[in-house]
Image (cartoon, coloured by chain):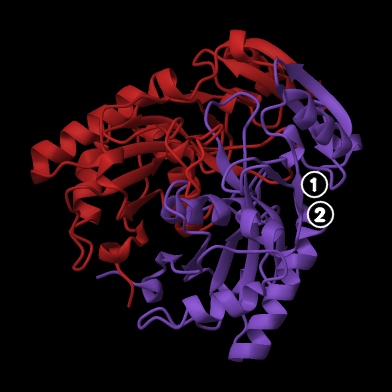
Chain colours: A red, B purple
């Protein structure tokens, strides 16, 4: 069977983390879940963790009357620095982090009734904490991506993207390298962090209660210091659609 | 090692397809490349093929003076039905297929000097042709995605998305299913075709001349009749940013 040694990549769901509560240590939960036979984490793996469990562990939960649309609207406004579009209850806004997404990332699914989950204050920092924790606890060096589910302007359906990363590149710059025909490549800053988040989502799935996955076999050159805030968030000066 | 039987997914690059020319049969090239030991295609695999080789095989190449920006601009306009934004040489436009992307998908990289590659006329049809061809030649039933590399409005870096599919879902609708806490999920039409395209890109890479990949282990419920045009392309009536 093809393996990572042949240039392949394996996506492995991390099961059994259980329900996450404010104050829980995600590194503890990951270490316990990763102790299953055959699932030993390795140097160079990338661990993708969904925003929802990061927000829960970090206590980014607020009480809300979920039956009251005005309450959610007020919360979305308070999490936004700029509203781009509204349609019915849907708000597309820019968050304090510079993300542009639906409802400022405020989420009522997969949290306790009467609560909403907010985005982590700094998902790059959250990712660094998990990298450091796994190094300290297991003696291994991995990359970590915090993922969330965003819509897209002109395409139906949501996909998972990276809202934080550490130890793995956000954007890999292939500009100036030659294509197979020797011509210089155009427009080839590839957002591998978003592709890794999307790939991991394929084995997590919203309805299966798998909040994390391992991506095994990524090129070692991608494993470096990195940040979603610095590499992916597009400043307004570059932006054609704000 | 974790496998597809545990809910994992494996991404396998398809190497050795060689340079593709107008009139080449991509099914022939795939069958030959897939004959390597250990790489036998299986029922339920998803084969992701990049737009570039589909366009070449289908003869979607035009002569162009690549040193002349006006020539490329004219070609981009002729491939567009609507221009959304311009900045310098960059044009964001809507193609005849309803895709909104940079330069109407006109691509000068990885094609012969003096040529540009245009998008396939109907990538869903291209995908169906490969599904049918692989069934006829190998007796197996796979899904096929045609992928291309698009930018995003508010995030730096490009990612691969699906511009055509057959035999595998474009969007999987989880609306109305319950989350792990028993609450109905919101906004969960997941664009698995785009996530599969992004995942495959991780093992293809722009500079490594790997134009296709196998995704092994996708849920069998995703393997069905599908179309990017019908499921992913967002009609202007739904659109907040056109």
Residue sitting nearer the eye, B113 or B191: B113
Is B122 on the left or on the right of B33, as rendered? right
- Chain of residue at mark 2: B
Is residue B170 visible in this depiction of the protein?
Answer: no
Residue A73 position in % (x across, y down): 70, 19
Q: Residue B233 carries which label?
A: 1
On screen, B147 above or below A221? below
Answer with left or right where residue B218 lies relative to residue B9. right
Q: Are marks 1 and 2 on the same chain?
A: yes
Q: Which of A56 and A224 is in front in this view?
A: A224
Between the residue at mark 1 and the residue at mark 2, the CA separation in whole angstroms equals 5 Å
- Residue at the location (41% across, 18% down)? A230
Q: How many marks?
A: 2
Q: Name the side, left or right, on which A167 lies relative to A77.
A: left
Q: Residue B15, how many percent across, how many down?
A: 43, 67
Q: Which residue is drawn at 67% across and 71% down?
A: B24
* Disc 1 to disc 2: CB gap under 8 Å: yes
Which residue is at a point 55% across and 21% down the rendered structure image?
A: A99
Q: Residues within 10 Å of mark 2 (few under 14, many from 20)?
A: some
The chain that hosts pointer 1 is: B
- Helix, strand or loop under label 2: helix
**Any part of residue A220 in sight:** yes
For this rendering, which residue is in front, B210 or A104? Answer: B210
Image quadrant occupied by the C terminus of chain A: top right
Q: Is residue A90 left or right of residue A190?
A: right
Query: What residue is rendered at 36% in x and 24% in y?
Result: A227
- Residue B28: name its quadrant: bottom right
Q: Name the residue under label 2.
A: B229
Expressed as whole percent of the image width and height from the top left, the position of residue B226 reads 75, 66
């Amino acid at each position: 069977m093809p393996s990572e040694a042949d240039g392949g990549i394996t996506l492995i769901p991390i099961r059994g983390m259980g329900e996450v509560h404010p104050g829980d240590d995600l590194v503890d939960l990951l270490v316990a879940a990763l102790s299953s036979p055959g699932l030993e984490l390795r140097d160079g793996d990338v661990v993708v963790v969904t925003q929802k469990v990061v927000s829960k562990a970090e206590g980014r939960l607020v009480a809300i009357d979920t039956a009251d649309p005005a309450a959610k609207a007020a919360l979305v406004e308070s999490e936004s620095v700029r509203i781009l579009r509204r349609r019915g209850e849907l708000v597309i806004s820019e968050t304090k982090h510079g993300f542009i997404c639906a409802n400022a990332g405020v989420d009522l699914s997969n949290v306790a009734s009467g609560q909403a989950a907010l985005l982590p204050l700094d998902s790059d920092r959250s990712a660094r904490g998990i990298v450091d924790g796994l190094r300290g606890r297991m003696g291994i060096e991995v990359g970590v991506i915090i993922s969330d589910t965003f819509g897209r302007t002109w395409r139906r359906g949501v996909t998972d993207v990276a809202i934080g990363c550490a130890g793995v590149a956000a954007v890999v710059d292939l500009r100036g390298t030659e294509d197979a025909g020797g011509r210089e490549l155009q427009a080839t800053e590839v957002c591998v962090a978003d592709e890794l988040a999307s790939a991991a989502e394929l084995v997590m799935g919203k309805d299966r209660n798998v909040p994390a996955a391992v991506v095994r076999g990524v090129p070692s050159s991608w494993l470096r210091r990195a940040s979603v805030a610095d590499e992916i968030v597009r400043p307004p000066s570059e932006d054609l659609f704000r």
